[in-house]
Amino acid sequence: MTYVLGIETSCDETAAAVVKDGLEIVSNIVASQAKIHEMYGGVFPEIASRQHIVHVVPVLEQALAQAGLSLDQIDAVAVTYGPGLAGSLLVGVNMAKGLSFAAGLPLIGINHLEAHIYANWLDTEEEILFPVVCLIASGGHTNLVLMTDHGQYQPLGQTLDDAAGEAFDKVARLLGLGYPGGPEIQRVAEAGSPESIDLPRAWLRGTSDFSFSGLKTAVLYLIRDYEPADDLPVADLAASFQWAVVEVLVEKTRIAAEESGARQVLLAGGVAANALLRAQMAERITIPVLCPAPALCTDNAACVSAVGWFKLQEGERAAWDLDVIPGLSLVPPENG
Ligand code: KG4
Ligand code: ZN
């Protein structure tokens, strides 16, 4: 039995978790700062760092308490070192170094995007069969990658401008909804009709790339020019916008899966919590589509522990000079 303690502070969630043997969640604590950032319509970096400093120790205490374990029963510490906000990442990395130094535990640096993918291994009966096509759709990223084995990724495509989650957040703000925008748009869209307002889709045919800024701008102009402004059809706009994003994500993932000969599709990142996206992926893609439970799609530390366990088996250890890399990519440019 191997217990990996995971720490995640890359954006606006302070999270700690304990995972047994890479697959079984023993504890999973997430302290979200969303309510604090709501008034800014997005994450305010300095406030995020300061909130991590305030919450990181209580969150770790809770993660150990919920697991019923003390630090000397933990086998390794895994921590997100990028991509993300530098000041936020620093809090988690420094905490992890302190813990690992004090308790004499191996330290493992984790790529946040890889952590999102590995949420698919947690608390599930499903067996993952390589090669798989992964769609990572979060607030900062929208990537399609072919994963041929543990830790082996070939980039297929990515967003050329806004990330899918970023588009949800920005459009939610334009519609006067709360932050984060994804769950808000999903909620409001239930009362709207997805076919009611014709919005553009950037298909970028022949590539697995995405673009969401034109869609966002189309919504912006529609709202700006709508008369009377008080009668703005918020639910119809939310539903039509959500449908436009989902349709592109599903269709491009379907084609990538077909062309790459993947055996399964894995969904990852906060946008993968979207109910319409999950339903449409399952309906339109013929090979199995796996997705983590919604709470494991958004930022958490259990998925950091999961990758940490696989890396621990491979003998990977971070040196004491581990530093944060805000722009870390899933595939180093020289391999991609
Ligand atoms: O993965 P995540 O928690 O953080 C990042 O790594 O960015 O993703 C957060 C993003 C936000 O943009 C949020 O609006 C979006 O995921 N999101 C959703 C849903 N839940 C979260 N987007 C669409 N539908 C949802 N239900
Ligand atoms: Zn994330």
Image (spheres, rainbow, N blue to C red):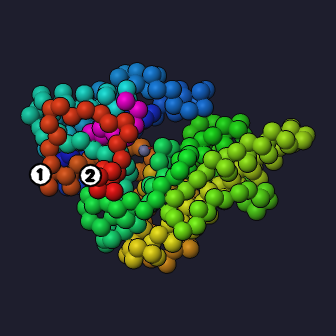
Say if 263 sits above or below 163 in the image.
Answer: below
* Tag shown at residue 315: 1
Is there CB contact under 8 Å for labels 1 and 2?
no
Which corner quadrant of the image does residue 8 belong to? top left
Tell me which amino acid carries mark 1. Answer: Gly
Tell me which amino acid carries mark 2. Answer: Val
Q: Secondary structure at mark 2?
A: helix
For the question of whether residue 198 can be seen, the reply is yes
Residue bearing the label numbered 2: 307
Residue 205: x and y in percent read 58, 67
Q: Is residue 88 left or right of residue 97?
A: right
Q: Residue furthest right?
A: 228
Residue 314: x and y in percent read 14, 55
Q: Is residue 52 left or right of residue 105?
A: right
State which region is magenta. 79-86
Ligand 2 sits in quadrant: top left
Residue 326: x and y in percent read 37, 36
Q: Residue 285: say if magenta.
A: no
